Image: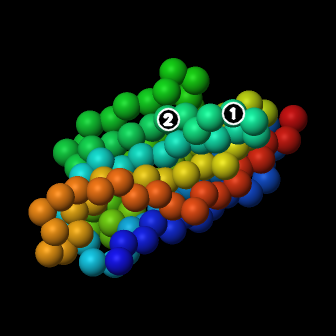
Amino acid sequence: QVQLVESGGGLVQAGGSLRLSCTASGSIFSIYAMGWFGQAPGKQRELVATITSGGSINYADSVKGRFTISRDNAKKTVYLQMNSVKAEDTAVYYCNAKIRPIGITSQYMYWGQGTQVTVSS
């Protein structure tokens, strides 16, 4: 069984910083792309940033220059450093990862339970 567990959410003032973490655990053979998605109240879940196993990175236009995604493959962890946050960054942030479980040849997308980020103005 594979699990993704996020941490690091909370309340932050506009202009401040927050760091999210997401660690994968369980029967994992390989982890491919990892990423963060955000879902604001009443809106669809949207891509924030992704990073491949080789380090290629993609950001949503709205966070470029403010957020930084990184990963530690040895720790099976992906991070999202959020700087200069704005009220519109308020959302539940979900981690996801494409993972090949042990004993299985296919890859599957897994999601974390989400962590709330609230930016006060």
Q: Amino acid at mark 1?
A: Lys
User: Are circles 2 and 1 on residues that touch, CB within 8 Å?
Assistant: no
SS at mark 2? strand
Q: Residue 118 appears at what percent x and percent y?
A: 77, 47
Figure check: 52 above or below 32: above
In which quadrant of the rendered view does residue 90 lie? top right
Figure check: 103 above or below 35: below
The foreground one among 87 and 31 is: 31
Quadrant of the frame with the N terminus: bottom left
Residue at screen point 18% across, 74% down: 102
Residue 62 seen from this side = yes
Residue at screen point 26% across, 37% down: 56
Q: Is residue 38 left or right of residue 77?
A: right
Q: Amino acid at mark 2?
A: Leu
Q: Residue 83 appears at what percent x and percent y?
A: 62, 39
In which quadrant of the rendered view does residue 3 lie? bottom left
Residue at screen point 19% across, 45% down: 54
Q: Residue 89 appears at what percent x and percent y?
A: 69, 36
Q: Residue 33 appears at what percent x and percent y?
A: 29, 48
**Mark 2 lies on residue:** 47
Indicate the colouring scheme.
rainbow
**Mark 1 lies on residue:** 43
Label 2 vs label 1, nearer the camera = 1
Q: Residues within 10 Å of mark 2 (few under 14, many from 20)?
A: some
SS at mark 1? loop
